Structure formats: C-alpha cells, structure tokens
Image: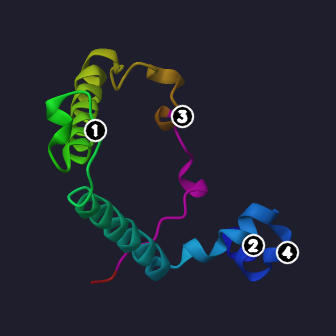
Amino acid sequence: MADKMKENPENLPLLGRKLLWLDNKNHVRKLIFGLYVTCALLFLADFFYKKKTYLDLEDIPGFYAVYGFGMCVIFVLCARALRSIVARDVTYYGSKDVQAEEYPEEGLSRETLND
C-alpha cells in the first residue's frame, strides 16, 4: 500500500506530499547532522556574550545545555524504572491475545529455505 502511494503521491494529503522527502535515508541523515551542527553552534555561542543571570550557576557557559541533557537522561531513567512498576506481565491477556490464536496450517504460507 505504501509503495502505491509513493508511485502516485497525488493520493496523499498535502502534509504527506510535503514530507515524502523524508523517506530517503540520506535526507534524514542530513537533517540530523544539521541538528547536531545547530546544537554545537548554539553551545559555542554561549561563550561569547554576557548573560543577565539571577544565580551564579547560570554564569557557567553551556550550563543550560548540560542541564537540559542531564534532565533528559534522568527522565529516561525514571521512565525505565516506572515501566518495571507499571508494566503488565507478558501473559496478562492470556487466551484472548491475538498471538495465542491457532492458525490452520493451510492458511500459513511457509517457505523452506534451501541452504
């Protein structure tokens, strides 16, 4: 289905047509590289101007970049810890789970690999 839409992008909504260039991995790599360069330039720019601060800690160049990264790491670690508390057991749904259904052998298209 996705291949048909790529062949005929007129069927996509306007936003889908505008973002179709993101299907190319090279474009995504360039976008991520641009993000890294922008972050590095903003970090370096923090060394070249005088800030009006309320706390002495804010005078450290790059403080907010390091603080933001640290808080993001702490957020991810807390989410992982919370997952162990909130996550349900793998067998929670039991027999009602789709993966527990029996499929007829003729309905499966099994192929044997010849090595």
Image vertical order of residue 10 relative to residue 74, above or below:
below
- Inspect the image, locate mark 2, and give the three-letter code of the amino acid beneath it: Met
Quadrant for the C terminus in the image: bottom left
C-alpha gap between disc 4 and disc 2: 8 Å
Q: Earlier in the sequence, mark 3 or mark 2?
A: 2
Circle 3 SS class? helix
Circle 1 SS class? helix
**Residue occupied by mark 4:** 10
Image vertical order of residue 101 relative to residue 89, above or below:
below
Q: Earlier in the sequence, mark 4 or mark 2?
A: 2
Whole-percent x and y of residue 51? 28, 45
- Inspect the image, locate mark 1, and give the three-letter code of the amino acid beneath it: Cys
Q: Nearer the viewer, residue 48 or 32?
A: 48
**Residue occupied by mark 1:** 72
- Inspect the image, locate mark 4, and give the three-letter code of the amino acid beneath it: Glu
Pointers 1 and 4 in contact (CB under 8 A)? no
Mark 1 vs mark 2: in front: 1
Q: Earlier in the sequence, mark 4 or mark 3?
A: 4
The magenta region covers 101-113
Q: Earlier in the sequence, mark 3 or mark 1?
A: 1
Local crowd at mark 3 within 10 Å, few (<14), some, or many (≥20)? Answer: few
Quadrant for the N terminus in the image: bottom right
Circle 4 SS class? helix
Q: Earlier in the sequence, mark 1 or mark 2?
A: 2
C-alpha gap between disc 1 and disc 2: 37 Å
The numbered disc on residue 98 is 3
